[in-house]
Image (spheres, helix red, strand yellow):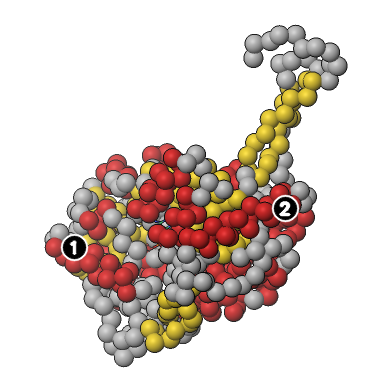
Amino acid sequence: MNGEWRDTATGRHAANVNPAKTDDVLGELPLSSAEEAAEAIAAAKVAQPGWADTPAPERGRLIARVQRLMAERAEDLARALTREEGKILREARGEVQKTLNILEFVAGEGLRLSGDTMPSEIGHTFAYTVREPIGVVGAITPWNFPVAIPCWKIAPALVAGNAVVFKPASLTPQTAEMVVSMFAEAGLPPGLLNLVYGSGSEVGSAIVEDPRVRALSFTGSNDVGVALYASAASRGKKVQCEMGGKNPILVLEDADLGMAVEATAQGAFGSTGQRCTATSRAVLVDSIADEFVERLAEKARALVVGDGLDESVDMGPSVDEAQFETVLEFIGAGREDGAELVTGGEPLTGESHRRGYFVAPTIFDRVERKSRIAQEEIFGPVLSVIRVGDFEEGLDACNDTRYGLTSSIYTQDASRIFRFVRGIETGITHVNSPTMGGEAQLPFGGTKATGVGMRELGKTAIDFYSEWKTVYIDYTGRKREAHFY
Ligand code: NAP
């Protein structure tokens, strides 16, 4: 806060625990108060005007320095991420690499903060637009991408000339500290990036409700996001919320089954299903469904589940006990609703799993479209297979959800590819590739219950973190004739 590390005055702390080995305690999470959040906001408010006066290319160069520092520490950051969040090392390295790409792209935005010049209706008038910072921005982030998501909010917010108050998820405080340290070491002046740990209900709400915070970027669950959106919007703030997903993969009879099975396994079980872009529904046409499910189940059974720091492991634990219980509850709901359990469905309790939150990769077949496991985000390694008669029924099943983040189709048929791209109600879609992924230079986000507000990443990120000012300069040098525009 304001360029200094300090402990909370509340005296309250919570243990930060490795989800693969719960006796491995990484540190203590300070549980700050609403008053401490207000102090951070005050520091940001004081620091921001000086930063807004710093040339945008210079602000971009700061991000480039953060990028270089992170590249040097990539392996340490990836290991800390695995130990804190549980994803396997390969995925943690992938997340760090993705963050490096984002920082590289955003650094260049400092040279591209352009507006437009437009002809005016009025003679001898020069009309143009400029981007201006918003002021103090709040960033509230989830635990599942604790390096990439904070950076894809903080970096464009800073390049656009704002100051940031950052509240990370309580489950991933150490990676948040590592990220913020790099901004400080890169030379960011005090007060421009303030990290406040603490509960969502106390620190998060304090950031949302404070009138000095003019914009809020939230990523997390739908329940929290829509309440936050209502609260922030009623205070006249600019808000963007990226929330849950229930992403489908549609596999048609002419698909390359090997590729489609591999993509589904990666999408459903990669990151233990704890991705907003995870594949949680496989929508299969009847003619290939039996073979597809058999091949997929074989892959699921072969996955090595364990501590992600072990390079031979394919899938890590659920992030904490609550998430672990949620996954088991959904598995129970699948059974109760009459879905056919193909594989998994159990917590893993062997010697190497006993100290962590491990669930076996799970597949349910013949899932009813309206059942809970077909409709609700599980955020665990559980895939629902929905069988359909043809493409039209498949597209309809894919859209039969309140969420709209991402989707995928596997087919060779150009006409159905284009009809799918046109008809699918998601913010991102893939053709013959898995549902996951997002690149620095392209907009990221969803429709329906997944997303409200402007998209993150790409050029659109700067649109969220800046305001337009429209300027008219009359150079006639005499009194203006009345006009009615
Ligand atoms: P979450 O429980 O909604 O929490 C997200 C953040 O909001 C955390 O920092 C949390 O703090 C904070 N928070 C909780 N209650 C709050 C309140 N009343 N006011 C203000 N802030 C509050 O979500 P999560 O479990 O961390 O993350 C998983 C969810 O994120 C999934 O639904 C996933 O799909 C979604 N997600 C979406 C995207 C996307 O781009 N669409 C990307 C990644 C993840 P605490 O940690 O202290 O509770």
Specify the quadrant of the image occupied by residue 315. bottom left
Q: Nearer the viewer, mark 1 or mark 2?
A: 2
The structure residue drawn at horizontal position 73% and vertical position 22%, both measured from the top left corner, is: 119
Above/below status of 371 relative to 23? above
Quarter the N terminus occupies: bottom right
Q: Secondary structure at mark 2?
A: helix
Mark sitting on residue 51:
2
Q: Residues within 10 Å of mark 2 (few under 14, many from 20)?
A: many
Q: Secondary structure at mark 1?
A: helix
| Res 354 visible | yes
Evaluate whether residue 65 shows in this view. no
68 left or right of 166 in image: right
Give residue 68's position: percent from left, percent from top: 71, 69
In front of the other: 245 or 481:
481
Quarter, ligand 1: bottom left
Residue drawn at (38%, 43%), measured in percent from left and top? Answer: 448
Tell me the CA gap for discs 1 and 2: 52 Å
Residue hosting label 1: 333
445 or 393: which is nearer to us? 445
Give the residue type at disc 1. Answer: Ala
Q: Most extreme residue toward the bottom, as rendered?
A: 351
